[in-house]
């Protein structure tokens, strides 16, 4: 599948998977595998079910194999801990900005 290029994403340290993508921004017609149904528990204990795929995810020159899910909610790309744990980053709280260093 393909996702439209963006320079902005949300980082969610409570999201254990790799990537959450809004369905309206992702073309899953080019994926050659069947989706899996993922059960995801939110911080408040709510259970939600999402279509998910195991995928190669490229950020800059880095490539990851991880789990991405498609969601009906929101417009933002969300990076989860499967990816964040592999990156060197700096969080500037007052500016509400996370900088990821691509080496």
Image: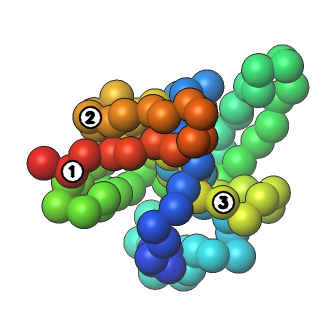
How much space separates mark 1 and mark 2, taking CA atoms?
A: 8 Å
Identify the disc placed on residue 76.
3
First in residue order: circle 1 vs circle 3: 3
Give the quadrant of residue 99: top left
In the structure shown, which secondary structural element does the residue marked by tag 1 occupy? loop
How much space separates mark 2 and mark 3, taking CA atoms?
A: 21 Å
- Compare residues 35 and 68 and report the one nearer the observer: 68
Mark 1 or 3: the one toward you: 1
Callout count: 3
Mark 2 or 3: the one toward you: 2
Relative to 46, residue 3 above or below: below
Q: Percent x, y for residue 32? A: 41, 72
Relative to 18, residue 33 above or below: below
Q: Percent x, y for residue 21? A: 60, 60
- Compare residues 7 and 28 and report the one nearer the observer: 7
36 displayed left or right of 71: left
Q: Are marks 1 and 2 in contact (CB under 8 Å)?
A: no
Q: Percent x, y for residue 3? A: 49, 74
Residue under numbered circle 2: 88
Residue positioned 71% across, 76% down in the render: 24
First in residue order: circle 2 vs circle 3: 3
Q: Percent x, y for residue 5? A: 45, 76
Residue positioned 61% across, 25% down in the render: 14
Badge 1 density bin: few <14, some 14–19, many ≥20, Cα 10 Å = few
Q: Are marks 2 and 3 in contact (CB under 8 Å)?
A: no
Residue under numbered circle 1: 102
In the structure shown, which secondary structural element does the residue marked by tag 3 occupy? loop
70 displayed left or right of 56: right
First in residue order: circle 1 vs circle 2: 2
Identify the disc placed on residue 54.
none
């Amino acid at each position: 599948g393909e996702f439209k290029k963006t320079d902005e994403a949300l980082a969610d340290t409570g999201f254990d998977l790799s990537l959450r993508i809004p369905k309206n921004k992702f073309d899953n017609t080019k994926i050659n595998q069947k989706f899996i149904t993922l059960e995801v528990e939110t911080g408040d204990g709510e259970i939600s079910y999402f279509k998910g795929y195991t995928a190669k995810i490229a950020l800059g020159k880095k490539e990851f194999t991880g789990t991405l899910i498609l969601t009906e909610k929101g417009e933002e790309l969300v990076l989860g801990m499967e990816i964040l744990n592999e990156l060197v980053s700096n969080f500037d709280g007052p500016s509400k900005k996370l900088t990821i260093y691509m080496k």
